[in-house]
Amino acid sequence: MLLVLFIGVDPKVAQIALDILKPDDAKYVDNDEEFFRLLDHPEDWKYDVVIAGPLVAELAVIEIGQSLRTIASSTPIYFCHHSRDAGFERNTFIKNGFSDAFLLPFEAAPLREALEDALPQLNDKALRPVRMIDISAGHALPFDLYIFLPLNQKYIQYSRAGHPIERERVAKLLNHHVGSVFVPQKQMQKFFEYTALKLKELNAGDGGLSETEKRIRAQSAIRNLLSDILSSSPSADFNEGKQLLAEAGEIVKAFMQMSGVGELYNKVLAILNESGDSYSHLMNVSTFAALFSIATGIGEPEELALAGLFHDLGLSVIPHETQVKDPDQWTDDERRAYQLHPEFSLRLIKEKKVALSSNIQTMILQHHERIDGKGYPKQIESHRFRKDAQLLAVADRFDELTQVKPGQMRVTPLEAIQRIQAEGAVDSDVIERLAPIFEPSVLNGKIQTHPDQQPADSSWHE
Amino acid sequence: MFAADTRFLIVDDMMAMRRLMIRALKELGYSDFLEAADGAQAWEALISSKISVGVILADWIMPNSNGLDLLKRIRSSERFQDLPFILVTVESNAEQVAKAKKAGVTGYIVKPFDLEAIKANLATAYKKAAG
């Protein structure tokens, strides 16, 4: 928390400084009395930064600078005003105690830089690239949004948390071919929650959208969210891939909080997190399964997310040696035991009295079945192989294929989905409904907007 | 060190700076202060003060009669020529310090001052005054 002292600053000028200092991170004192009090009690100094102006009765500007500097030898003290009529003389100001002086609004950018340099608290300007699935004019985002201008090599603020975005700005964003947008690291949770809410709305279907329109928008949203992951090549940075997937996981987590099962989801995550090992696989499958469900309209995303977390629970009763051994070298007993793990998962769920719906239990039981009846553990026939269970099977296999494992070639997401298709374990309908989110031609991560905000000329989408 | 009942004359056109200087001197145990906003006022205070001023702390840059003018006037007067005179100023370049020395300044404090600088300057000024 930043403590900011304003002294004699013009209100409009103060607003510019406030914008930079971000109201939710700073506490302000704008009170000349405080200044006079500090003259007698300099030991009470507690401010991180001072923004001063010429509007203090009976005080010359340099008097403010000199006295503040005497009270606080190392605090950044900036003189800010809108005109030179108060005798704006930068060098004189600096000589008299001010750290610097800025004519606003013209010098807002240098002021921002000065503040960011001086205040490490502000300096966590770390921005995360994000994929927005929806930006609409007139609506306010609960987080700040930045865009990167390659020509100027600068990040600029596109919109401010809580402030509605004007129509022209949305059009501008679309027309200027902005590939990615950025959110301050510390506001990422807000981004996850917002995205989850948007996904929720999308999945519930809002007024007037046909099933096809809804599906297209859902596919597009998921494609945008996962585009960095889905477009990654085998050589793509492993850690970055992990980070992106973790962020997708946070979105699903936020999504789950909006349903009745949030508490259960959190509890299981916490337990899994402690047990380590297969945590990332379970988390990934849960994330993919939920997002795939939203994109395809198959199953309920909440159920798929939970099924993903629990699907391999039964592996815990399979001996470790079996699990690490190449399946080709399993003995018959080992194979039989391993292939029972979906049933073990269910048994453990019952033993632990975890309240999971019968849909979820069936998905867990069926996630290694095949439509040709050659899966396990029950070799069920295709008509009994639930679609949502098939989607869980795809998510499971997808994560397995795209994981980096020693001695194993990593496949790209597109290759993975093609391989899953070739393996023929699931219905071609499931793959077809999933395919649009893997289309390489649309993996550039463009921002989706409502159709009426689409510029007539859609060249930004090339 | 100067006795606790020493009378100080604080000369600065800036009220805030006088207040801060007085506050610092109080911290050092002093309690008798005269204030002036420029050289002319200071001279007036100096000659009319019933209790002799023991130390002058004066800003350099002031309207009307500045700190250096005041210093020159004091040094050229018979009555005050040995009065400890400390300039407290943002002017810190060698040329200006030399100018002040030539005019007979006792001590030189560069703003922003702190308690230590004031203390050290007073100690030196006292030694000089004690001969």
Image: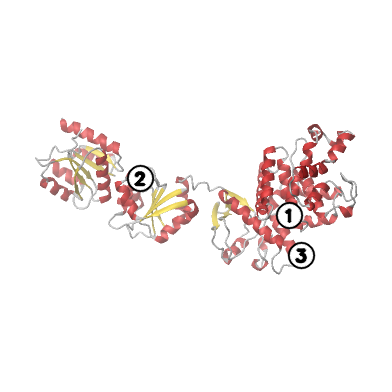
- Label 3 marks a residue whose chain is A
Residue type (three-letter) at the residue carrying disc 2: Asp
> Nearer the N terminus, badge 2 or badge 1?
2
Residue type (three-letter) at the residue carrying disc 3: Thr
Residue placed under numbered mark 2 in the picture = A44
- Label 1 marks a residue whose chain is A
Q: Is residue B95 visible?
A: no
Who's the residue at 54% across and 55% down the image?
Answer: A156
> Nearer the N terminus, badge 1 or badge 3?
3
Asked if the residue under mark 1 is in contact with the one under mark 2, i.e. CB atoms within 8 Å, the reply is no
Q: Does residue A381 appear left or right of residue A293 in this picture?
A: right
Q: Secondary structure beneath disc 3?
A: helix
Residue placed under numbered mark 1 in the picture = A301
Both on one chain, marks 2 and 1? yes
> Nearer the N terminus, badge 3 or badge 2?
2
What is the crowding at mark 1: few (fewer than 14 residues within 10 Å), some, or many (at least 20)?
many
